[in-house]
Image (tube, grey):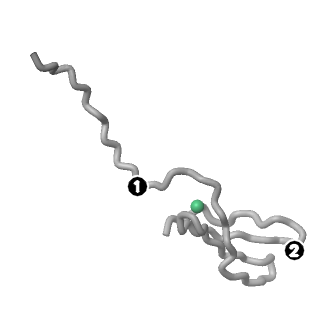
Amino acid sequence: MTSLHTFPTPQIPTVQTPPHEHAWLVESRHPTSEGTVVYVHCEGCAMRRVDMQLHPQMPPTALSRDLPA
Ligand SMILES: [Zn+2]
């Protein structure tokens, strides 16, 4: 007898890359009257983000959500 008790394996399509610590690399900086707009991208997954750095001594805050390439 062959066993018919086979469990269906759920095939969930995963289009997203597994979460990891993004390694943001600065692509370009654009000084504005509000602060410096910093365009960054992740070397690991090519994710892109736009940051706003209000002061040179302050870490930039994310203006945009993480944008997949
Ligand atoms: Zn990444």
Residue 69, given in percent of the width and then of the height, sits at 49, 69
Crowdedness of circle 1 by 10 Å Cα count: few (<14), some, many (20+)?
few
State which tag comes first along the sequence, 1 or 2: 1
Q: Is residue 64 left or right of residue 59?
A: left
Pointer 1 residue Cβ closer than 8 Å to ligand 1: no
Ligand 1 sits in quadrant:
bottom right
Disc 1 residue type (three-letter): Val
Outermost residue toward the left in this view: 1
Q: Secondary structure at mark 1?
A: loop
Q: Secondary structure at mark 2?
A: loop
Cβ–Cβ under 8 Å for marks 1 and 2: no
- Compared with 12, 28 (above or below) is below
Q: Residue at x 87, y 74 (%)?
A: 56
User: Quarter-wise, where is residue 47 in the image?
Assistant: bottom right
Which of the two residues, 21 or 51, is positioned nearer the viewer here? 21
Residue 54, given in percent of the width and then of the height, sits at 83, 71
Outermost residue toward the top in this view: 1
Residue 49, given in percent of the width and then of the height, sits at 62, 68
Q: Which residue is mark 1?
A: 15
Where is the N terminus found, in terms of image quarters? top left
Outermost residue toward the right in this view: 57
Cα–Cα gap, marks 1 and 2? 36 Å
Q: Is residue 55 left or right of residue 60?
A: right
Closer mark to the observer between disc 1 and disc 2: 1
Q: Which residue is mark 2?
A: 56
Count of picture labels: 2
Which of the two residues, 35 or 44, is positioned nearer the viewer here? 44
Q: Is residue 59 left or right of residue 11?
A: right
